[in-house]
Amino acid sequence: MSSGTIDIEEFENADSDEFEERTDTERIVLFLDAHDDRAWKAATIAKRLGMETDAVSAILSRLKERGLVRHKRPYWAITDDDERLQAAYQLHQYHENATEQYGGEDLEALRTSEMEDVQ
């Protein structure tokens, strides 16, 4: 697909959203979710997704902090908490929809002294 073309059969058989650009985090979560019957090394995930191992490791660490992946060194797997994963996906969709509708804003530029930091 990097050449700017794909086979017409691949085009015809693809889901309507299959060719949308995804963030690296989305790609990792979708990969782990699609292969939820296995646990993976970060290097293997990186190779499968065409990413750098260090970048995948950093993203996996952030996802672990949010409870979206499980980790037993050296393996990683998607969370088994379906409700948590669904809530994270819904929050992500709300954010994407708001950005699409209203445009991206620099949140720091909008900060007031009355605003609380949200963790």
Image: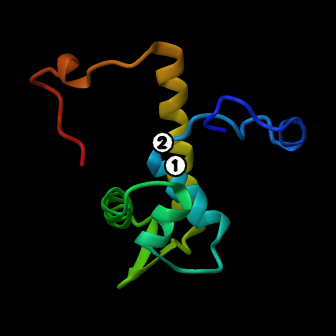
Mark identifier at residue 82: none
Q: Residue at x 57, y 35 (%)?
A: 21
Mark 1–mark 2 CB contact (< 8 Å) = yes
Depth order, front residue of 51/23: 51
Q: Which residue lies furthest to the left in this view?
A: 113
Query: Between 111 and 49, which is closer to the camera in this rendering?
Result: 49
Quarter residue 61 falls in: bottom left
Image side of residue 73 versus residue 82, left or right: left
**Image location of residue 111, percent across then percent down:** 18, 22
Identify the residue at image location x=51%, y=57%: 28
Which image quarter is the N terminus in?
A: top right
Secondary structure under the numbered disc 1 in the rendered image:
helix
Q: Residue at x 37, y 83 (%)?
A: 74
Residue type for callout 1? Glu
Q: Residues within 10 Å of mark 1 (few under 14, many from 20)?
A: some
On the picture, is 72 further left or further right than 86? left
Q: Where is residue 99 in the image (x, y as percent from the top left)?
A: 47, 23
| Mark 2 closeness class: few <14, some 14–19, many ≥20 residues within 10 Å | few
Residue type at mark 2: give it: Thr
Task: State the separation of the CA atoms marked 1 and 2.
Answer: 5 Å
Q: In this view, does 59 lie to the left or right of 114?
A: right
Q: In the image, what residue occupies the spot 59% across and 56% down?
A: 30
Q: Which mark is residue 26?
A: 1
For disc 2, the marked residue is 23
In the image, residue 72 sits, relative to residue 76, either above or below, namely below
The answer to whether residue 35 is above or below residue 98 is: below
Q: Which colour scheme is used?
A: rainbow
The quarter of the displayed image where residue 14 is located: top right
